[in-house]
Image: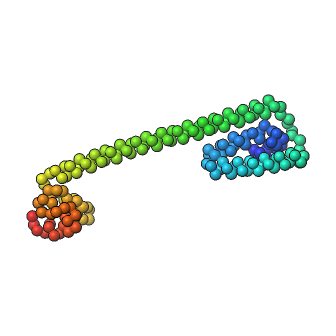
Amino acid sequence: VIFAFGSFTEGAITSSSFAGTLAIVVFAGLIFGLKGAFALAAASIATGGLSVYLLTHDLLPPPAIVYSPINIYADFVVFLLFTALFTGKAISSIDFTTQRFEAELQERKRAEAALAQSERSYREIFNSTNEAIFVFDAAGKLLDVNDAMLRMFGLAGKEQALADPAAYLASGI
């Protein structure tokens, strides 16, 4: 908006600096997101409309500097190059972040696969031994038992073992 108002002193929408509003809207989008870009675009459209009105009604002072078409074109090229540079930088940053996210996702998948393999190995050892294994938490609650324990106590399944451990643990086996 300041950019657009500044262009009033140079001939409003006929000034070379007015083309810079495009670059500013792109930068706002990169920095503040979609809402920021639309807010700045709306403000720029409003000031551009005001500029057109003031120009068509001869309400603006004559420009202090009259730009030739080559000056306007050169300024426009500079604005385009800066816009391309910052857009490229933003895209590069987004690509880097995406690659980092994908690498973290792959690492998480590898860790989950390793954990699943470790769990399978634990279960295999846990259930293949001939010794009864009881797993308790810190409060003394029975969390798990192995197949050998079920056979030793003549229980039908883990649900029965976990439901009332006092009933079979008190038997003294």
Marks counted in the figure total 0
What x and y, as percent, mark residue 139?
26, 65
Q: Residue at x 81, y 39 (%)?
A: 15
Confirm whether residue 22 shows in the render.
Answer: yes
Residue that sits furthest to the left in the current view = 173
What x and y, as percent, mark residue 138?
26, 62
148, above or below 84, in the image = below
Q: Residue at x 71, y 41 (%)?
A: 22
Residue that sits furthest to the front in the current view = 156
- Quick check: 14 left or right of 107? right
What x and y, as percent, mark residue 50?
81, 49
Quadrant containing the C terminus in the rendered view: bottom left
> Where is residue 145, by image quadrant?
bottom left
Q: Residue at x 83, y 34 (%)?
A: 67
Residue that sits furthest to the top in the current view = 70
- State how the image is colored: rainbow
Task: Name the foreground residue: 102 vs 31.
Answer: 102
What x and y, as percent, mark residue 90?
58, 40
> Where is residue 168, by image quadrant?
bottom left
Confirm whether residue 132 shows in the render.
Answer: no
Q: Residue at x 60, y 36 (%)?
A: 88
